[in-house]
Amino acid sequence: MTVYLRYGWTGRYDDCEAPNYTQDEYEEARLLYESIINKVVNIHLRGSLRECRWVLNSSNFGFYEALDLIRDRWEYSGLLTVEPEGKKDKSLFNSFVKAMQSLRT
């Protein structure tokens, strides 16, 4: 079994870092994600560009916070795809390239 995780969906429903979870609910959600992470073949992040950086819309946390959680806490090192939200604007191409480079650090 393989799993495709769209992070924007989990963030929208507060599945990863919900501030109003009880400690038991938080622990249950954390264990769920950590138990399936070795089956995940792709994590998909969808965000907007703002000043050469990625921003998550409709989320209680930032894009780079999510990225740190995925890489560091979940220890995920597999495929990561990023999809820009909003209308395509050729004048933002350099910002897009810089935002993509920011994913490496």
Image (spheres, rainbow, N blue to C red):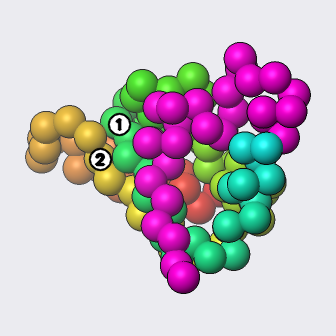
Q: Earlier in the sequence, mark 1 or mark 2?
A: 1
At 61% from the left edge and 38% from the top edge, which residue is drawn? Answer: 15
Magenta stretch holds residue 18: yes
Q: Position of residue 24 (x, y in %)?
A: 86, 33
Looking at the image, residue 37 lies above or below residue 27: below
Q: Which residue corresponds to mark 1?
A: 49
Q: Quadrant of the C terminus?
A: bottom right
Confirm or deny contact between disc 1 and disc 2 (CB under 8 A): yes
Mark 1 residue type: Leu
Residue 21 location (% of width, % of height): 74, 24
Q: Residues within 10 Å of mark 1 (few under 14, many from 20)?
A: some
What numbered label is drawn on residue 84?
2
Dot in front, 1 or 2: 2
Q: Label 1, label 2: how many angstroms apart (C-alpha)?
A: 7 Å
Q: Can residue 69 be seen in the rendering of this structure?
A: yes
* SS assignment at label 1: strand
Residue 26 picture location, percent across and down: 79, 34
Q: 69 or 91: nearer the eye? A: 69
Identity of the residue drawn at 78% across and 33% down? 25
Indicate left or right for 69 with 100 as reference: right
Label 2 residue SS: strand
Q: Amino acid at mark 2?
A: Pro
Residue 63 found in image quarter: top right
Q: Which residues are magenta?
A: 1-27
Q: Which residue is outermost to the bottom?
A: 1
